[in-house]
Image (cartoon, helix red, strand yellow):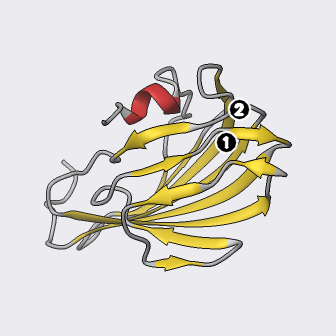
Amino acid sequence: MQIELLRFLHVERKFGGPLRFGVIEFRFDTCWNENPGYRARYWRTEICLRWPWRLKFRLDLTRYGEGGYLEPHLDPVYEGERQYNCIFVLRAPERGGELLAERFVYCGSRLKIIEPNLYLHELTPVEKGERIVLNLGIYFAVRRIPPRP
């Protein structure tokens, strides 16, 4: 079962306009976004290098309160792009809140690396306490992309 990732990310994301320095773009989320259905709040920053191949880093700080979860899903994929997420658990809940995936690139107690656009993954409901994670998303195009107009 898949969900649309934007439903989790809250469709009304409030990115400011990108700051461009040559081939590098910075985008900053202007506020904490909250999705009450998943009991999660997150803050996001993106750094994108566009030439000659696209390379983007996304940094999310996410807090899941009691009852917070993610349904099994695949992240959206763009043609010719690979994606890896490095998930650093800053605060683990007392019970629940486990990240489950069909396949991990690396799976430690505080660090997990997944390919979220290839393998189903989910977060079990946080039963007690809160879960705070720092997620470093790395996206890269496997072939050259045309320059911006």
Residue 142 can be seen in this image? yes
Give the residue type that dot 1 points to: Trp
**In the figure, residue 38 lies in which quadrant?**
top right
**In the figure, residue 142 lies in which quadrant?**
bottom left
Is the N terminus in the top left, top right, bottom left or bottom right quadrant? top left
Which of 143/84 is in front? Answer: 84
Q: Is residue 10 left or right of residue 82?
A: right
Which of 24/9 is in front? Answer: 9
Q: Would you name the residue on which mark 1 appears? A: 43
Q: Estimate how packed mark 2 is, as few (under 14), some (14 to 19) or many (20 or more) residues with alpha carbons within 10 Å.
A: few
Q: Would you name the residue on which mark 2 appears? A: 32
**What kind of element bears circle 2?**
loop
Q: Is residue 134 left or right of residue 57?
A: right
**In the figure, residue 141 lies in which quadrant?**
bottom left
Find residue 51 and report its horizontal and vertical position in percent. 28, 70
Find residue 116 and report its horizontal and vertical position in percent. 38, 57
Which of 22/17 is in front? Answer: 17
Find residue 82 and report its horizontal and vertical position in percent. 28, 66
Q: Measuring 72% from the left and 63% from the top, which residue is drawn there?
A: 89
First-in-chain label (2 vs 1): 2
Which of 109/127 is in front? Answer: 127
Find residue 57 and report its horizontal and vertical position in percent. 48, 63
Give the residue type that dot 2 points to: Trp
